[in-house]
Amino acid sequence: MNKLKLVWPAALALLIAALIAVFAKSMMVEERLVSIAAHDQLGHHPELLEQPLPIQALLLDYQTDSLLWLKTLSALHVYPEHTPMLLEFFGEEPEFRRALRAQGENLIPPVIHFYRNPVTTIEVLNRITGGEASLSPEQRAWYAVNFANKEGDDFTGQFRVAPDGSIEWIWTDRITEGITQFFTSGIRTLETRYRTDQEIRASDLGWAAVDAVIIGSAVKFLKAGRVAANTARTASVSTRTASYSARLARAGQIASVVVSNAKWPALIALAYVTVNHPAILNDLFAGAAAVLGVPAWAVQLPGWFLVLFPLLVGVSWLARMVHRMFAPRDIRGVRQK
């Protein structure tokens, strides 16, 4: 092939690669895969795709439990402002999932009320059971979740939402049922469980050896990728390389779920998803740049050039072949010869 014929495909490939490197927004591979799965599985609920990516990952996990999934959709519909916040706080906790599965949207008002307002009886009992400082809003909300699990409708039924959106705790129910239950529902157990849960959640920071973590959900997959990236940022190149390789292996496992075939080899599944969603390739180049410790464009530009150049050369050759096959011939020129 004439070298001059390679000039314009090379120039065009370089131009397109530069435009992609400058304007395309790269994401972590884990985030991209969760986003793809969310668009695939939650696409019939467009409003859910407007939620932050961690909430989308949580909703993907909830789909495995049809009743929890339906109750969550109901809560998001009735309380669109409050439910995402509670999902962000407690969505991974088994206690919250159990309460939401049983109570649905009725769980939201009491938890939000406890989040917004200190409750004197709980503050006193917290000090009696060994707590020193005042409870944080998240801790108060966590008490409400556990009360809902303990008392069910007897607790959640005490709350009413006023027309202006404010939440009221009905005092008659509170006096006849609430106070008694506060003193007999195992406050010490709730406090211990809360503190234990906090310690477990804090241990996420110890996910440096992420290749030993078994990914069982979209949420854990998302968190593991972020923690791995942050942990490896200040490590050596070899450590970053090993961490990124482990992340790609797990990404392949999630990709096999995205294509609804968990039996596919991980890397083949990831390659298949990449062909269907080329944006992942841009993310892979950015991840490789992070491993090498260079700006993202330093890998994206040559990476996209190497992908696009052979493709454009092939398109150019195919176009010439088609032109030769279908172009009209000069009959008189043929006779003169």
Image: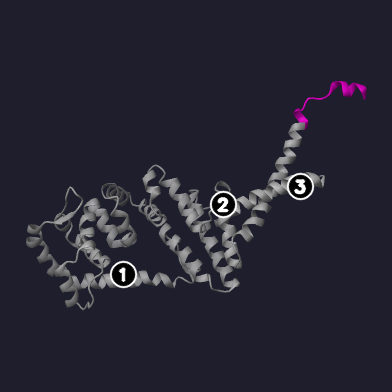
Q: What residue is at 22 percent from the left and 53 percent from the top? A: 103
User: Which one is closest to the eye, mark 1 or mark 3?
Assistant: 3
| Residue 7 numbered mark, or none | 3
Q: Earlier in the sequence, mark 1 or mark 3?
A: 3
Q: What residue is at 63 percent from the left and 61 percent from the top? A: 298
Check whether the beta carbons of the residues at disc 1 and disc 2 lie within 8 A of each other. Answer: no
Q: What residue is at 21 percent from the left and 51 percent from the top? A: 165
Q: Secondary structure at mark 2?
A: helix
Query: Mark 2 to mark 3: distance in Å?
Result: 24 Å
User: Would residue 193 be found to the left or right of residue 240 on screen?
Assistant: left
| Residue 330 numbered mark, or none | none
Q: Secondary structure at mark 3?
A: helix
For badge 2, the amino acid type reads: Phe
- Magenta part of the protein: which range? 324-337
Query: Mark 1 to mark 2: distance in Å?
Result: 42 Å
* Crowd band around label 2 with a 10 angstrom C-alpha radius: few (<14), some (14–19), many (20+): few
Instruction: Give whichever of 312, 251 is nearer the camera.
Output: 312
Indicate the position of residue 109 as horizontal and vertical percent values. Answer: 21, 55
Indicate the position of residue 333 as horizontal and vertical percent values. Answer: 88, 24
Q: Which residue is mark 2?
A: 23
Q: Earlier in the sequence, mark 1 or mark 2?
A: 2
* Crowd band around label 3 with a 10 angstrom C-alpha radius: few (<14), some (14–19), many (20+): few
Compared with residue 1, is residue 112 higher up or lower down, i.e. above or below?
below
Q: Which residue is mark 1?
A: 197
In reply to whether residue 308 is colored magenta, the answer given is no
Q: Earlier in the sequence, mark 2 or mark 3?
A: 3
Indicate the position of residue 237 as horizontal and vertical percent values. Answer: 60, 71
Compared with residue 175, is residue 81 higher up or lower down, i.e. above or below?
above
Give residue 61's quadrant in the image.
bottom left
In which quadrant of the rendered image does the C terminus lie? Answer: top right
